[in-house]
Image: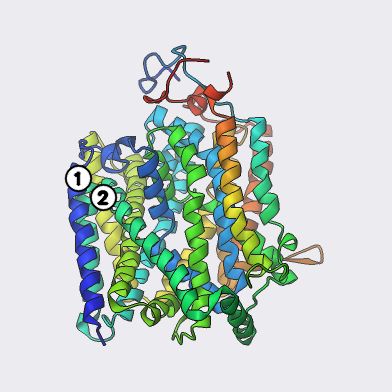
Amino acid sequence: MKTGPSSKPGARGGGRASRPAFHPWYLVLLIPFIALLWPPFYAHDQPEVWGIPFFYWYQFLWFLLGAFITQIVHVATRPRSAK
Amino acid sequence: MINWTTLIIFVFFFLLVTVLGFIAAHWRRGDLTRLDEWGLAGRRFGTVITWFLLGGDLYTAYTFIAVPALVFGVGALGFFAIPYTIIIYPLVFVLMPRLWAVCRRHHYVTPADFVAGRYGSKGLALAVAVTGILATMPYIALQLVGIQVVLATMGLGGAGVGADLPLIVAFLILAAYTYTSGLRAPALIALVKDTMIFITVLAAIILIPLKLGGYGNIFAAAAQALPLKKGFLILPPPAYLPYASLALGSALALFMYPHAITGVLSARSGRVVRRNASLLPSYSIMLGLLALLGYMAIAAGVKAPAPSLAVPYLLVKVFPAWFTGFAFAAIAIGALVPAAIMSIAASNLFTRNIYHAYFKAVSSAGEEAAVAKVVSLIVKVGALLFVLVLPTQYAINLQLLGGVWILQTFPAIVFGLYTRWFHHGAMLLGWLAGMIWGTYMAASTGFRSPVYPLHLGGMTFNAYAALEAFVLNVLIAVVGTIVLDVVRVPRAADATARDDYEAEEPEMVAPVAAG
């Protein structure tokens, strides 16, 4: 079935990288979920920064941290970076 | 009252992207009589184009109006858009390359194609296709509402026979270039749209606080004004669960929308998708900044007759007329990009998974694309009539329902990327239960709130209805699978193999040499 017309010639064995369903690094991706889906962590007024309540700057900070974490996992799980 | 400077600038940019839309047919030339060329632009988009396309696709004009409007109206709760658009990308990073890989290998164009191949079940595929179309239609209608809002602020519209003419003209233009150029049109226009939105947002978040005396003043003004309208600046404990469940439910739902999947499938490789998962958060920051415009509108003392007019009124109030025209054009063009992609995605679903599967076998690739093009027109005309004939509130209610509905396709699509453990019959039952219960919950609040108080064992959980329906959906799928397997209801064949999900397409630029 999988060698039907849709599978490409030379699909197997031609030095193709493959990505398994799970990689230990994927666990790191859970951090933003924990940090953001539990509002008691950050639903506070203080500490303020430049008059901006914690609730707001904490979440904005996570835009950067979230992107950073995804980027790290992306680099760490790149097939060719292994060896 | 019409400000002519604003209007002329607005019309100029609108015409500019119209020309681009038609030119797009010749961009990265492909045979536009094939569905994967018309509807997926030949799956050839690299990292940059995919970034603009997905960004332009996911952050719609309606989002730009609705998120600040919610913040303007209720305060902190509206900021659930931030956790929502952050946690979405780890999900995309892990899930979407698998979907891309299997769809590429088997030439699947829609999520329902994948479900049909994976489970061998036409019924389940139909459920996914119908849900996708149902959820997309009101979303397209809301893009029109977004255009309507800026047109109304410019003094166009109002009463009389000619009131709807500008909207109709805008939509005819959109329909025409989507028909001729397919997905290439919104991709090319997204480059312009995103640039314009970036300029607008940057100007707003720098200039407006300067006029209002800094962010401290803006938050102080919001803290004073919000309690008067029963809003709050800092999330109170009773709002924790609604906030978190809205963020999680919306994040799980977003990439089940057909237009989001269309954006993913048009990428050149799984690697492009992964790279975008780490690059798109920079787009989300803009949405967070836009949300702040809701507070700026409060601080600037904007008197908007409806919350949805808060941002347009704010822009008129603080910017010179020419820049307002530019900003309004950015919002209106911001409606055209997703509307085009949504109509393409809906017509792909209809053509492949309903028309071809149930009515008339499509014999050639040319016929398939021809049907899809016509359906994309019908979809858009339907959305236009929806907005012109029915009150705006209907579109908003239905879009809320759409979010509830689309999440019910998550188990079939995402679980299917990992396992064939689930029985297709059980998945169908779970989907049905989620659809019915989700619709009931949304209707019982009079569509006033996406949050439904669920009473369980003496406790009340105030959570996003989509997520509650999703939990029921999964429970039934699990129990149903066990039962159906025990009574030996036969399963159909799986057209996919493990390698289909995990194969990494070789990328031309990457050096193969090992170190």
Q: Residue at x 22, y 36 (%)?
A: B30
- Dot 1 falls on a residue whose secondary structure is helix
Q: How many marks?
A: 2
Give the image location of residue B270, x and y in percent: 45, 33
Displayed quadrant of residue B236: bottom right
Residue at image x 44%, y 17%?
A: B512
Q: Is residue B358 visible?
A: yes
The answer to whether B14 appears left or right of B304 in the picture is left
**Which chain is indicated by disc 2?**
B
Q: Residues under labels 1 and 2: Cα distance?
A: 7 Å
- Viewer can see residue B424: no
Amino acid type for the residue under numbered disc 1: Ala
The numbered dot on residue B25 is 1
**Residue at the spot of label 2:** B185
Could you tell me which secondary element the residue under label 2 belongs to? Answer: helix
In front here: B500 or B300? B300
In the picture, the quarter occupied by the N terminus of chain B is: bottom left
